[in-house]
Amino acid sequence: MNLTIPNWLIILGGAGQIFTAIIYPYIRHVVFDWYNDILKLKPLNQEIAKTYGRYIQGLNFSFGLIAILLPDDLKNQTGLAVALTGLIAAYWTGKVVTQFAYYPMYQIPRKAIFKMGEVLMNILFISFAVIFILLFIQNLS
């Protein structure tokens, strides 16, 4: 199988990942009222939760920046390309699995804009997983 992922698709995926990093604080604050919920935690647990939120945001932004700036390097079949595309593929695949396995148990606000946002974000997450799984496979072949 001769699989070649075009640079424009990698760059588009990168832009989407940066978008998720930028929109992440809005989703936490407005959609989930996250900061008011974590105020119920002990101070150390509050800081841990905030730190993990920043890790997620930072990874999304970093993966996006790498995809935009280094699309050729992400598909050059080196050991680093295999490792990095495998990591990003696992990250987004894990996000998609978590999204569908655990999140349906919880209610998000039922406003139409939030429901539409949920669908569009899920499409983005699935797209990121697919793009990087294909890149990983391309690097392995």
Image: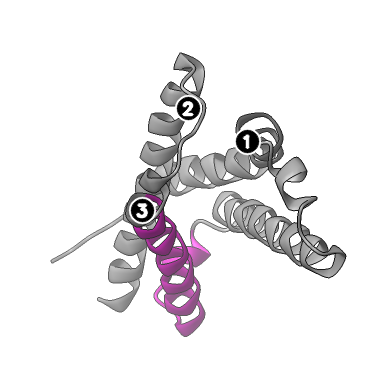
Q: Residue 2 at x, y = what percent?
A: 18, 63
Residue 131 badge = 3
Badge 1 density bin: few <14, some 14–19, many ≥20, Cα 10 Å: some
What is the magenta segment's predominant secondary structure? helix
x and y percentages locating residue 99 in the rendered image:
40, 51
Q: Which of the two discs, 2 and 1, labels the residue nearer the N terminus?
A: 1
Q: In the image, which residues are magenta?
A: 72-99
Q: Which residue is mark 2?
A: 117
Instruction: Give how far across and how far down residue 15 sits, in percent.
Output: 56, 40
Determine whether the residue tagged by mark 1 lies in a helix, strand or loop: helix
Q: Residue furthest right?
A: 43
Q: Residue at point 54% right, 47% down?
A: 14
Viewer-proximal residue among 127 and 71: 127
Query: Mark number for residue 27?
Result: 1
Hey, which residue is sitting farthest left in the picture?
Answer: 1
Q: Is residue 140 above or below residue 14?
A: below
Q: Earlier in the sequence, mark 2 or mark 3?
A: 2
Q: Amino acid at mark 1?
A: Ile
Q: Are marks 2 and 1 in contact (CB under 8 Å)?
A: yes
Going by the numbered disc 3, the residue's amino acid type is: Ile
